[in-house]
Image (spheres, rainbow, N blue to C red):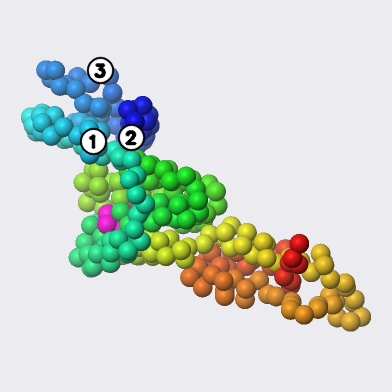
Amino acid sequence: MSPKRRKNLFTDYLQRIVAELQADGWIVSTEDQGLPGAFRADLVARRGDEMLIGELASRETAKRDSLEQLARLAESIPGARLQVYWLGDAVESLPVPANVERIIVEARGVLPHSTPASLLLAWAGLEAAVTHLSSELKLQVMEVGASSWQTLTNLYSLGHIDESDFKRLSELWRVRNDIAHRGSPTKPSNEDVSFVLDLARRMVRGQYASVDDMIDWFLERYEDPVNQLPYDGAEGGYQYQGDGPFDADEVLREAFPQSSEASFLEAARLLNSMAAEWVLKRDE
């Protein structure tokens, strides 16, 4: 990664962390930090008697001695702790689906023993699955780490992630961050972890389809019979020739057997509101 690109990623990630901390009631400083001696960190946050010393690092830039010094400093200050935010390095290769499947299996194995640990593993699998999905859709693959959520948000904004799924993931993302970055005792439910795992599995297997994806796929292949068939009320309506009519529900069930029931029902409802029957589009 070029120094300029790393600096931009660093700045974006730092701003995001500061915003999150401020939303949680912290007073954050990146300049006048008030640390003793010559110590400086990327940020210092205070909330009541608590102090958080934050440092951004990556595999390429982390300096062990510097982090150890900050850790000892945090130990010497009552109510203080060091938080290292790991910055994603450049994507060297796309996730291997078999490796993502392995993470999912491991997360399921941990689930009966610890839902927080299982969620952290599940989220790692989801981030890799999201990158895989983005690549399969031929979208720009963004940086790992700080950009994994941006990639998911990008997929949602383009209609490739359903609103209900994105809303639930948004809530679980905050839970995941509380566990990973703040040592929160929060325990997600088994259902929440299973939701993340199922989503990751379907994404990496090419079995995830949003409502928008299903509707786009359908409308590329089928159309309202009014566009191509004669209508005769005395003879029962549209005069079908060959195949047809087609029912949107049946076509979607066959084309997207792995779709969630909620997504399927919404896609079918929207298509049925456009037309009660459908025909295959003619070749141009």
For the residues labelled 2 and 1, say whether their Cβ atoms are less than 8 Å apart: yes
Q: Quadrant of the N terminus?
A: top left
Identity, as a three-letter code, of the amino acid under mark 3: Asp
x and y percent of residue 8 in the render? 37, 29
For the residues labelled 1 and 3, say whether their Cβ atoms are less than 8 Å apart: no
For the residues labelled 2 and 3, say whether their Cβ atoms are less than 8 Å apart: no
x and y percent of residue 244 in the render? 74, 77
- In the picture, measured across the screen, residue 56 lies left or right of residue 154, that is left
- In this view of the protein, which residue sits in the foreground, 99 or 12? 99
| Other residues around mark 3 within 10 Å, as few (<14) / some (14–19) / many (≥20) | few
Nearer the observer: mark 2 or 3; the answer is 2
Which residue occupies 90% across, 77% down?
A: 233
- In the picture, measured across the screen, residue 179 lies left or right of residue 218, that is left
Which mark identifies residue 270? none
Which residue occupies 27% across, 57% down?
A: 121
x and y percent of residue 160 in the render? 52, 54
- Residue 83 magenta-highlighted: no
The span shown in magenta is 119-123
- In this view of the protein, which residue sits in the foreground, 45 or 119? 119
The image quarter in which residue 10 lies: top left
- Residue position for label 3: 32
Judge whether residue 276 can be spotted in this image: no
The image quarter in which residue 15 lies: top left
